[in-house]
Amino acid sequence: LKRSIRERDHYICQLCSNLQSDEVFSVHHIDYNKKNCNPNNLIILCRRCHGKTNHNREYWTKYFQSKISLEV
């Protein structure tokens, strides 16, 4: 599943647009529910951006949900 999400996102951080290289990017749960592994709830983030999303979770949930809805 993680590999398919990275492939879907073209190995690009969905926040800063950096391309994955030596460091494997994290698969982030948009709603912070680790049991919700629906692909629409998953995106990839670099380590720096993934760290940013640990604070102000309500903001980031809305931010990524709106980003996903624009892509559909």
Image (spheres, helix red, strand yellow):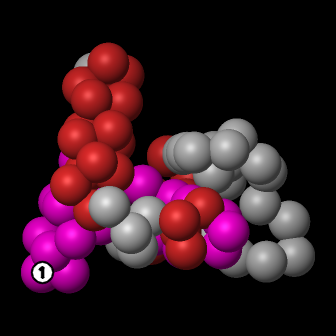
Quick check: 29 left or right of 44? left
Task: State the SS at label 1.
Answer: loop
Up-down relation of residue 36 to residue 42 (above or below): below
The amino acid sitting under disc 1 is Lys
Q: Nearer the viewer, residue 3 or 47?
A: 47
Whether residue 37 is visible: no
Quick check: 31 left or right of 53? left
The answer to if 72 sits in the magenta stretch is no
Q: What residue is shown at x 87% (from left), y 76% (from top)?
A: 22
Residue marked by disc 1: 35
Up-down relation of residue 22 to residue 60 (above or below): below
Q: In the figure, residue 14 lies in which quadrant?
A: top right
Residue 38 x, y percent position in the rendering = 17, 60
| Residue at the right extreme, as displayed | 22
For the C terminus, the quadrant is top left
Q: What residue is shown at x 63% (from left), y 51% (from top)?
A: 13
| Residue at the front extreme, as displayed | 56
Residue 15 x, y percent position in the rendering = 57, 45
Residue 19 x, y percent position in the rendering = 79, 51
Q: Residues within 10 Å of mark 1 (few under 14, many from 20)?
A: few
Whether residue 61 is visible: yes
For the N terminus, the quadrant is bottom left
> Which stretch appears magenta?
26-48
Q: What residue is shown at x 20% (from left), y 81% (from top)?
A: 34
Q: In the figure, residue 65 lies in which quadrant?
A: top left
| Number of numbered discs overlaid on the protein picture | 1
Quick check: 24 left or right of 38? right
The answer to if 41 sits in the magenta stretch is yes
Up-down relation of residue 17 to residue 52 (above or below): above
Residue 43 x, y percent position in the rendering = 42, 55
